[in-house]
Image (tube, rainbow, N blue to C red):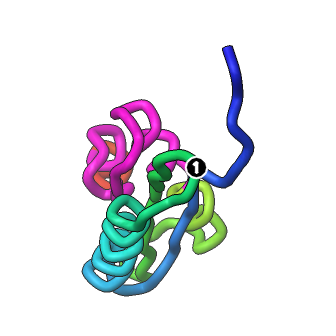
Amino acid sequence: MQRTPGYDAAMFTDLLPQSVYAAAERIRRAVAHARWQHIPVTASFGCATWTPASGRPPAELLADADRALYQSKRDGRNRVTHRADMPEAVAVSAG
């Protein structure tokens, strides 16, 4: 199997869930629709948000984005996943 070097993932964190998800989706679409010289290129993104009312430490923000990123990859790549949309995130936030 031949591996192609490159970047295939990114994590975003923000305080506004709609803005981070929308930004990641715009970038994902731009990458997917761009004309690449040698191979098709796609991007997967993991997003997470944090608010003081969540009761969770802010340090968990990057870990949440990382979990969402890997969920995007498990779901077939070339997608955006927000941590709040993942089933176990609902259980964590419910306490």
Image position of 89 (left or right of 11): left
Which residue, given by chain and number where applicable, does mark 1 sit on?
38
Of 38 and 18, the residue lying toward us: 38
Residue at image coords 52%, 56%: 64
Q: Position of residue 29 (x, y in %)?
A: 31, 66
Q: What residue span does the magenta drawing correspond to? A: 66-90
Most extreme residue toward the front, as rendered? 37
Of 16 and 51, nearer the camera is: 16
Tell me where residue 22 appears, x and y as whole percent. Answer: 28, 78
The quadrant in which residue 10 appears is bottom right
Q: Is 94 within the magenta?
A: no
Which residue is pictured at 66% across the width and 69% down the height?
59
The answer to whether residue 84 is above or below residue 49 is above
Q: Residue at x 51, y 74 (%)?
A: 13
Q: Amino acid at mark 1?
A: His
Residue 36 drawn at (x, y percent): 50, 59
Asked if residue 49 is positioned above or below residue 77 in the image, the reply reads below
